[in-house]
């Protein structure tokens, strides 16, 4: 069945792809795409997510920044509020949708860790903090199509959870 060009899920995926290709910072790309298509989030959350790109501070050792962006979006909608946190309320509903996104990501890429995602999509990982490593990452398609594809998938899966389950 063809997808409507007005479908917010596909709009979010397309925006995330385009942003990752042209601007980088995978968590920001996912969050901006979701904010612009589903009206969730805030520019300060996008700003705060920037240090989480490239597996946290470009280390590639942490969780993929695109996945972090999707998790943050789900947390914005279903996470425990500051008031509930202050009251000690332990009832939280964020984990069911977050687990769905996490499991879908791990099923697709084999791991949530940036370095291992790079290995899955580019057959090796890169030292994003070194000029040579970053150049090799770009040459391998890092921002041409590889990481934009990951960002698009996360935005698509997150938007699908938001639109169809929340």
Image (cartoon, grey):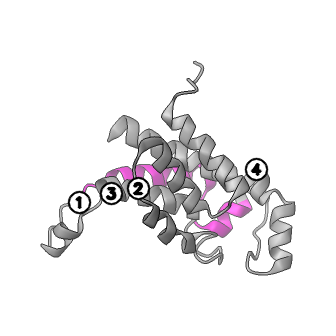
Q: Is label 2 in a helix, a strand or a loop?
A: loop
Say which residue appears at 76% left-offset and 77% top-offset: 127
Write down the residue under mark 4: 145
Q: Which of pointers 1 and 4 lies earlier in the amino acid sequence?
A: 1
Q: Is residue 13 above or below residue 52?
A: above
- Tell which of 12 and 1 is nearer to you: 12
Q: Which of pointers 3 and 4 lies earlier in the amino acid sequence?
A: 3
Write down the residue under mark 1: 92
Q: Is residue 147 visible?
A: no
| 116 part of magenta stretch | yes
Badge 3: residue crowd in 10 Å (few <14, some 14–19, many ≥20): some
Say which residue appears at 61% left-offset and 52% top-offset: 151
Q: Nearer the viewer, mark 3 or mark 2?
A: 2
Q: Which of pointers 1 and 2 lies earlier in the amino acid sequence?
A: 2
Write down the residue under mark 3: 95
Q: Is residue 84 visible?
A: yes
Q: Quadrant of the C terminus?
A: top left
Q: Is residue 26 above or below residue 125?
A: above
Q: Which residues are magenta?
A: 92-119
Badge 2: residue crowd in 10 Å (few <14, some 14–19, many ≥20): some
Badge 1: residue crowd in 10 Å (few <14, some 14–19, many ≥20): few
Report the Cα–Cα distance between label 1 and label 4: 36 Å
Q: Quadrant of the N terminus?
A: top right
Say which residue appears at 63% left-offset and 67% top-offset: 114
Is residue 87 left or right of 155 when viewed as pictured? left
Write down the residue under mark 2: 41
Report the Cα–Cα distance between label 3 and label 4: 30 Å
Q: Is residue 72 above or below residue 10?
A: below
Q: Is label 4 in a helix, a strand or a loop?
A: helix
């Amino acid at each position: 069945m063809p997808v409507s060009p007005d479908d917010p899920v596909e709009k979010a995926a397309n925006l995330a792809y385009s942003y990752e290709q042209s601007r980088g910072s995978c968590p920001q790309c996912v969050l901006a795409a979701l904010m612009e298509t589903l009206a969730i989030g805030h520019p300060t959350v996008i700003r705060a997510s920037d240090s989480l790109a490239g597996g946290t501070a470009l280390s590639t050792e942490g969780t993929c920044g695109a996945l972090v962006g999707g998790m943050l979006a789900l947390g914005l909608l279903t996470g425990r509020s500051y008031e509930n946190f202050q009251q000690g309320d332990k009832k939280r509903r964020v984990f069911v949708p977050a687990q769905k996104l996490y499991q879908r990501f791990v099923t697709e890429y084999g791991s949530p860790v940036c370095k291992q995602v790079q290995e899955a999509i580019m057959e090796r990982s890169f030292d994003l903090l070194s000029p040579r490593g970053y150049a090799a990452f770009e040459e391998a398609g890092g921002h041409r199509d590889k990481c934009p594809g990951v960002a698009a998938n996360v935005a698509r899966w997150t938007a699908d959870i938001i639109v169809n389950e929340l």
